[in-house]
Image (cartoon, rainbow, N blue to C red):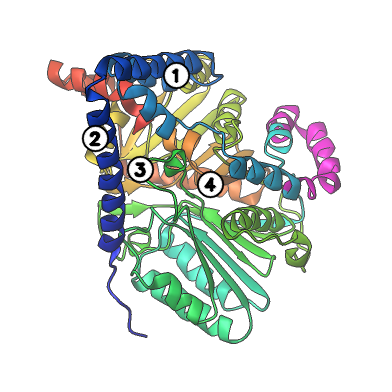
Amino acid sequence: MKKLLPSGWLRILYILIAFIIQVSVLVLVFRFFRSQFAYFQLLSTTVSLLVVIHIIREDTNPSFKIPWIVINLSLPLLGGFAYLFYGNIRFLSRERGFIEELARRHRVLLPSNLDYLDELSRLDQQAAKQSMYLATKANAPLYRGTITRYFPSGEDFFQALLTDLETAERFIFLEYFIIRPGKMWDAIEDILVRKAAAGVDIRLLYDYFGCIVTLPSDFRFRLESLGIKVSAFNRKAIFFDARFNHRDHRKITVIDGNIGYTGGINLADEYINEEMRFGHWKDTAIRLEGDAVQSLSSQFLALWSYERKESEELESFIPSTTCNDDGFVQPFDDEPLGGERVGETAYKNLISRSVDYVYIMSPYLIIDNDMIRTMTDTAKSGVDVRILLPGIPDKPYVGILNRSYYEVLLRGGVRIYEYTPGFIHAKQFVSDDKIALVGTINLDYRSLVHHFENGVWMYASSSVLRIRDDFLKTLEASEEMTLENLRRRGLVYNILLSILRLFAPLM
């Protein structure tokens, strides 16, 4: 099948035009009020002052408050209005409706799984407390009867995914942040088209801004014409809109309700090293088979319903097969609309409750003081805390930001490594040979605050030791960072780091 080249520049042009129109409106407003500038200045300053009071009173992290306060005090004419557009304010009824719908869907799954929480509590009370948080704050059931399989590379994931897609008989759900035509997506699309022709219900949800330069302009319409249901998340969010910050960063595949995938891997060739962008691309994923897959179906359907304004009950998409136990498995999601920072708290709980070690892979290290304290306090108590980051960052300024946190963490006893062959995109934690967490949640403000994310928490699953072993194997191709490395930085570099650190929550 002949594929069109990506024409995302048309979408960028559309957004640019919308941006120019909105800026033009602001300029006209300024010109209109120029003759009465004193009144306009008073209005703007009042708005900025009220915003600062709101920020101070808001129950959020000080690291997020400080840059907005600086902007509002330094630029009172624009700061207040900028916060109203981009400050993660949650006031739209549609968003509140989504939260209620998401909770309702997940609560349907919770009652039958309470016995598993009691069982885990008898085995390991510290692990049970982690699981209880996800159950109560993210409405995430704990499961048994689920087999897990860990993939240490995009190449392994890709081959398994193709095999599983070929088995679909009822439905396939796909939800991804980035899709790019190439070897990976073309092979997947060929299967989807054949399955749709055979009557399989195929649904694809992708993030509009994540794919803005990667997909052809006719992508959605062409797939719809082939019998595949397609939605682009947040396609109608205008530039001056609080929703603009919210991206669907999740990666989910569900096949017939029996098999599910998630992790860091998007559907583009760099994720399977068919395209070399930042050296060797290291990424990971987890495959679920059994009861826990219904939570992935629930996550997908909630966001699908939110975007399509269609409501379907989960009962039509529950697993039809039963699997042997492979430990405890708890898929969960994190969204930016309800105010609970689930992913961040899950990470902190896992770190602070570790006894022997906690190993972390992440592409980004842009964290607040609470996370720094959690890591360093845990390391100071004798726990082996290690973080593995890219040697070749995907964005130069992000590499600088990552390294701006090294000194405080190293002095606190945390060990930091950089993967010298290239870029690490995996987002996972493993602790004490018992617990692991694999998902889409980066250690940065966008993932922890603004994005729709998801992950899988596991206890005593066979994948836990495989995740540990993969981390240690990857360390062999990595360089450990030391305080001596950092002393080579000059004064100008350190000043740049301080400025970037201040505004990191807004990047």
The correct choice, above or below, for 252 with respect to 415 in the image is below
Do labels 1 and 2 touch, CB within 8 Å? no
Percent position of residue 233, x then y = 49, 55
Q: Amino acid at mark 2?
A: Val
**Crowd around label 3: few <14 · some 14–19 · many ≥20 (10 Å):** few
Helix, strand or loop at label 3? It is loop
Task: Give the magenta part as a residue range.
Answer: 106-132
Residue drawn 41% across and 19% down? 47
In three-dimensional space, the C-alpha distance between marks 4 and 2, rounded to whole angstroms, equals 43 Å
Query: Considering only order in the chain, which callout, 2 or 4, is on the residue closer to the N terminus?
Result: 2
Element at badge 1?
A: helix
Residues under labels 1 and 4: Cα distance? 34 Å
Quarter-of-image position of residue 14: bottom left
The residue beneath circle 1 is 51
- The quarter holding residue 419 reads top left
Amino acid type shown at disc 4: Gly
Pair 4/3: label in front: 4
User: What is the spatial separation of the Cα atoms under label 3 and label 2, in whole angstroms?
Assistant: 56 Å
Q: Tag 4: Cα neighbours inside 10 Å, few (<14), some, or many (≥20)? A: many
Give whichever of discs 1 and 2 has the lower sequence position.
2
- Mark nearer the N terminus (3 vs 1): 1
Crowd around label 1: few <14 · some 14–19 · many ≥20 (10 Å): many
In the rendered image, residue 145 lying in the magenta stretch gets the answer: no
Question: Where the C terminus falls, by quadrant?
Answer: top left
**Residue at image point 38% right, 32% down:** 365
Judged from the image, the secondary structure of the residue bearing numbered disc 2 is helix
Q: Which residue is mark 2?
A: 27
- Which of pointers 3 and 2 indicates the residue nearer the eye? 2
Q: Can you tell which of label 1 and label 4 is closer to the viewer?
A: 1
Question: Residue 476 got which mark?
Answer: 3
- Under mark 1, the amino acid is Val
